[in-house]
Image: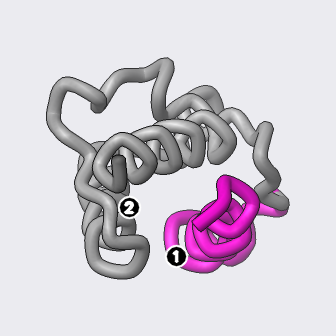
Amino acid sequence: MTAEEYAAKLIPFIQENLLPKDSGITVDASTPLLELGVLDSLKTAILMNYIRGELGVVIPPEQLSSSNFASPGTIVTVIHDLAASNAG
């Protein structure tokens, strides 16, 4: 899967499942998830389950950093890099 394909799946998931319906936030690749308080420990676990179950990528604990989860774009980069390294 390309980075764009991962983003096309991940961004709507974040928008629909991790944000309050009345937040007024529209998620795109550069939305600062941590800065806006979108990701807490529970929502990060939900996101990790989605990534593993729906995108088929396991993010190892050492990759769980604020820089890797700062925005959907940084998360997609991690997912894409892990998928590429596992495929090779």
Percent position of residue 6, x then y:
61, 64
Judge depth for marks 1 and 2 and give the one in front. 2
Residue 7, numbered label? none
Q: Image point 18% across, 39% down: which residue?
A: 60
Percent position of residue 79, x then y:
46, 48
Percent position of residue 34, x then y:
54, 32
Percent position of residue 67, x then y:
49, 19
Q: Which residues are magenta?
A: 1-25
Disc 1 marks a residue whose amino acid type is Asn
Q: Image point 29% across, 29% down: which residue?
A: 63
Q: Secondary structure at mark 2?
A: helix
Q: Quadrant of the N terminus?
A: bottom right
- Which residue ends up furthest to the left in the rendered image? 61
Q: Is residue 9 magenta?
A: yes
Disc 2 marks a residue whose amino acid type is Leu
Q: Which residue is mark 2?
A: 47
Is the residue 6 above or below the residue 17 in the image? Answer: above
- Please name the predominant secondary structure of the magenta segment in the image: helix
Q: Disc 1 versus disc 2: distance between alpha carbons?
A: 9 Å
Asked whether, in this view, residue 2 is left or right of residue 27, the answer is left
**Residue neighbourhood size for the residue with mark 2, other residues' Cα within 10 Å, grouped as few (<14), some (14–19), many (≥20):** some
Residue 17, numbered label? 1
Query: Considering depth in this image, is 72 or 20 the residue closer to the camera?
Result: 72
Q: Image point 57% across, 38% down: which residue?
A: 77
**Residue neighbourhood size for the residue with mark 1, other residues' Cα within 10 Å, grouped as few (<14), some (14–19), many (≥20):** few
